[in-house]
Amino acid sequence: MAEIILHHYPMSPFAEKVRIALGLKNLAWRSVEIPMIMPKPDLMPLTGGYRRTPVMQIGADIYCDTQIILRELQRRFPALPLTPAGHEGVAEALAYWADRTLFWPAVGVVMAVIGDQLPEEFHKDRAAFSGRPPDPARLKAMAPVARDQLYASLTHVERMLDDGRAFLLGGQPSLADVAVYNPVWFVLQRLGARTPPLTSLPGIVAWAERMGRFGHGQPTAMAAAEALDIAERAEPDAPAGVDESDPSGLKAGARVSVTPDDTGKVPVSGELVTLSATEIVLRRSDERVGTVAVHFPRAGFILAPAG
């Protein structure tokens, strides 16, 4: 089996979501560190323009967004399942809630404190990423709102832990824990446990300490050029095909584009080779890496015929 290659940078919250999952499964993987801001010249040949972090590569198959990354890790390495039997839907729903709702107030809490310490290049990059003008003063002014919204959301999680369970769905960590850990880790790493609202949520702080003990598995560094060479030499896995009953009406071989629906709205175009309720796969070619298959989750992404 080809190696797991994770393209990421150390302080990326969503990369930590994947790294802690690799730790839970105690997997060996290769680590390619990418820039925190654009340009990302050694990533674009793989993704076709997708700029968010992290990206997972296995041979010539490229996985964009943590939803599809964790789903693929579970498919290939089913030991210690991230979606426990009988709780699959709950685990996935909690993870999606954490990604889409919990994450942003956590970012607001952190950026209100450190935003004015970051370089102008970072703010310009994130303005292009989010579609909002860079404004550290606005972030600082919104600090009370971000704190209160994070408190309201994390209180649901604190209540789940009130009965003494070690993890959100019981005695073993799951996809729900991995996803909720991401924003909590970000606050803890940047600001520490004495930061409101964590000061009012002792159960979550203790739970985060338990999660952190799983570590990151067995990473070894890899140069970006080596990862590109691996993609160039490999062939993508055989596609699963397009569901003929899919409500989009799209067929295999159609030229399509895939675009995130919230941030980093850069379309990736290619030939549709797989389509299901949970996955979109495009086949595309690049002069540096040859033919690759780029995988996206269905939820949170806009699929459209390419003009």
Image (spheres, grey):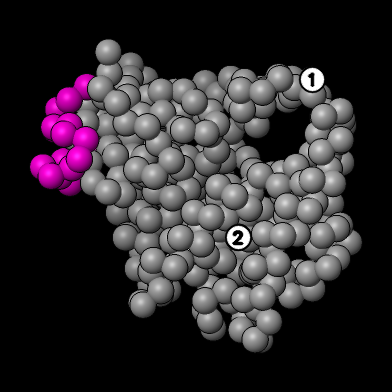
The residue that label 1 is drawn on is 120
Query: Where residue 152 sits: x, y (%)?
Result: 72, 60
Q: Nearer the viewer, residue 57 or 86?
A: 86
Residue 292 appears anywhere in the view = no
Residue 180 is tagged as: 2
Identify which residue is drawn at 49% across, 26% down: 265
Q: Position of residue 243 (x, y in %)?
A: 15, 44
Mainly helix, strand or loop, the magenta region?
A: loop
Residue lying farthest to the top in this orientation: 307
Q: Nearer the viewer, residue 210 or 291?
A: 210
Q: Residues within 10 Å of mark 2 (few under 14, many from 20)?
A: many
Q: In which quarter of the view is residue 298 placed?
A: top left
What span is colored magenta in the figure?
Answer: 235-255
Q: Which residue of the protein is positioned furthest toward the bottom in this rendering? A: 164
Name which quarter of the figure residue 260 lies in.
Answer: top left
Residue pictured at 22% horizontal, 22% vertical = 255
Residue 56 horizontal/vertical position (percent): 44, 43
**Residue 246 colored magenta?**
yes
**Upstream in sequence: badge 2 or badge 1:** 1
| Secondary structure of the residue carrying numbered label 2 | helix
